[in-house]
Amino acid sequence: MGFDGEYGPSTWEWVADQAAAYEASNGQQANTLRDTGLPIIVMTTVGHKTGLVRKVPLMKVEHEGIYAIVASKGGAVNHPGWYHNLLADPTVLIQDGPEPFETTVRLATGGERAEWWDRSVAAFSPYAEYQEKTDREIPLFLTETTA
Ligand code: F42
């Protein structure tokens, strides 16, 4: 199926709406988190149970061409569904502007995770509150360097 399979919109309407508006405008609109002015990206994964194409807006945390993908889900008790998709298949599309690019992601651990967690909180301070809210360690993936 891959990324050209059937699209499965988020069950959170505001999220599905943001992904749709971002894509329809080539990243020119709906590219911040509500009125915070903070930039977002859109990640595309393939549902590991359904095979559906899933589009996931995320806060933009980028450094030297590498993006952090923070599975915060607002500090929810469980990881977001897309976390399991990434474990099953680390190949994703990342859209940060007009054109998505394909890359793979890997879980960050140890010192590298700590460095990127600080970078993520600097970009979006609520991540720190989310981590306070939940006992799970919020997973942080990194994209491989873009080719
Ligand atoms: N979420 C974050 O975790 N981090 C962020 O930085 C972030 C920023 C952000 C900015 C703007 C915005 O609009 C949303 C933002 N979100 C952020 C929310 C994010 O886009 C996701 O909505 C959120 O992380 C929850 O992801 P989720 O995959 O749990 O989505 C739920 C709501 C959902 O749609 N679930 C689907 C459903 O039908 O219930 C299934 C999704 C899925 O991928 N299912 C898999 C499949 O096979 O199809 C199976 C997954 C499994 O559980 O095994």
Image (cartoon, rainbow, N blue to C red):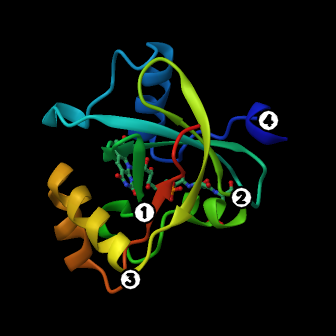
Name the residue beneath numbered marker 2: 89
Name the residue beneath numbered marker 3: 136
Disc 1 marks a residue whose amino acid type is Ala
Quadrant, the N terminus? top right
Q: Residues within 10 Å of mark 3 (few under 14, many from 20)?
A: some
Q: Is residue 82 above or below residue 44?
A: below
Disc 4 marks a residue whose amino acid type is Gly
Q: Residues within 10 Å of mark 2 (few under 14, many from 20)?
A: some
Using the rendered view, name the quadrant where residue 136 is placed: bottom left
Q: Residues within 10 Å of mark 1 (few under 14, many from 20)?
A: many
Question: Dot 2: what SS?
Answer: loop
Residue at disc 3, CB closer than 8 Å to ligand 1? no
Which callout, 4 or 2, points at the residue further toward the start of the chain?
Answer: 4
Residue at disc 1, CB closer than 8 Å to ligand 1? yes
As drawn, which residue projects farthest toward the right? 1
Which callout, 3 or 4, points at the residue further toward the start of the chain?
Answer: 4
Circle number at residue 112: none
Q: Position of residue 39 (x, y in %)?
A: 26, 34
Distance in Å between CA atoms under marks 3 and 4: 32 Å
- Nearer to us of marks 3 and 2 is 2
Q: Position of residue 137 (x, y in %)?
A: 37, 80
Disc 3 + disc 4, Cβ < 8 Å: no
Disc 2 marks a residue whose amino acid type is Asp
Q: Position of residue 68 (x, y in %)?
A: 39, 54
Q: Position of residue 128 (x, y in %)?
A: 18, 68
| Residue ID at (41%, 40%) | 65
Distance in Å between CA atoms under marks 1 and 3: 11 Å
Name the residue beneath numbered marker 4: 5
Circle number at residue 71: 1
